[in-house]
Amino acid sequence: MAHHGPDPFLKRWTFAVVIASVIVLLSFLYNTQREVVLGIVNSGVGAKAQIPIGPYYKVTRVVDGDTIVVDINGVEEKIRLIGINTPETVDTRKIVECFGKEASARMEELVNGKNVRLESDDTQSLRDIYGRMLDYVYLEDGQMLNRKMIAEGYAYEYTYMTPYKYQKEFREIQTLARVSSRGLWAAETCSGKK
């Protein structure tokens, strides 16, 4: 019996395998992208948090949404979070700005009485003009607080004179928060304006 061309069963089977492989690949890519986007928006750290290595310091007080006080070897130090700014609540020269109280309350909820790790940035001074230490602050679960505050819409990206290490990433996260109408970007809170 003469064989004329490829076996029809083999052609159908090969076609089915190719289609199934494409579906699996597309599903994997979709879920991976979705996890990363949700991770950035919800926690500000991407799909998987890296648990930072200590030392850790206890937060003794929250000043406002972008400044905390930590106990470093018995000395209380004010820490100004690099790359973020929150609406004003404590400056007596200014009125309380929209969503400022909410940003301060969220910071209290996240860190007051808890342990944090600090990361300085070689592109920035160690302290600002008010003597506050300038740092990125990490929670014990590995989330960076600076990112988280922007991702949740409690803070906005802020560059003081010199670009900092995570500037591009913070701006991208802010865009996601704004597009998602989170926090201060929501029409019902501050009319979507910082």
Image (spheres, rainbow, N blue to C red):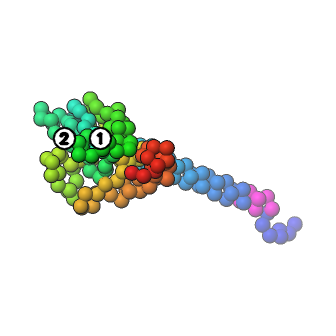
Mark 2 neighbour density, 10 Å: few (under 14) some (14–19) many (20 or more): many
User: Magenta region, mostly helix, strand or loop?
Assistant: helix
Q: Amino acid at mark 2?
A: Lys
Q: Amino acid at mark 1?
A: Thr
Say the numbered circle drawn on residue 89. 1
Q: Which residue is mark 2?
A: 78
Give left or right: position of 16 versus 132.
right
> How many dots with numbers?
2
Residue at image location 27% in from the left, 61% down from the top: 163
The disc, 2 or 1, on the residue closer to the chain's N-terminal end is 2
**From where the camera sits, is residue 65 visible?**
no
Q: Which residues are magenta?
A: 8-14
- Please state which of residues 28 and 159 is positioned toward the viewer in this rendering: 159
Residue at image location 36% in from the left, 59% down from the top: 168
Asked if residue 61 is among those painted magenta in the image, a careful observer would answer: no
Residue 148: x and y, percent? 37, 44
- Please state which of residues 90 and 92 is positioned toward the viewer in this rendering: 92
Q: Of the residues tagged 2 and 1, which is closer to the observer?
A: 1
Residue at image location 78% in from the left, 66% down from the top: 6
- Please state which of residues 106 and 75 is positioned toward the viewer in this rendering: 106
Q: Residue furthest right?
A: 1
Residue 37: x and y, percent? 48, 50
Residue 16: quarter of image: bottom right
Residue at image location 83% in from the left, 70% down from the top: 4
Residue 17: x and y, percent? 68, 56
Give left or right: position of 135 versus 150.
left
- Please state which of residues 118 and 12 is positioned toward the viewer in this rendering: 118
Circles 2 and 1, Cβ within 8 Å, touching? The answer is: no
Residue 95: x and y, percent? 30, 44
Residue 167: quarter of image: bottom left
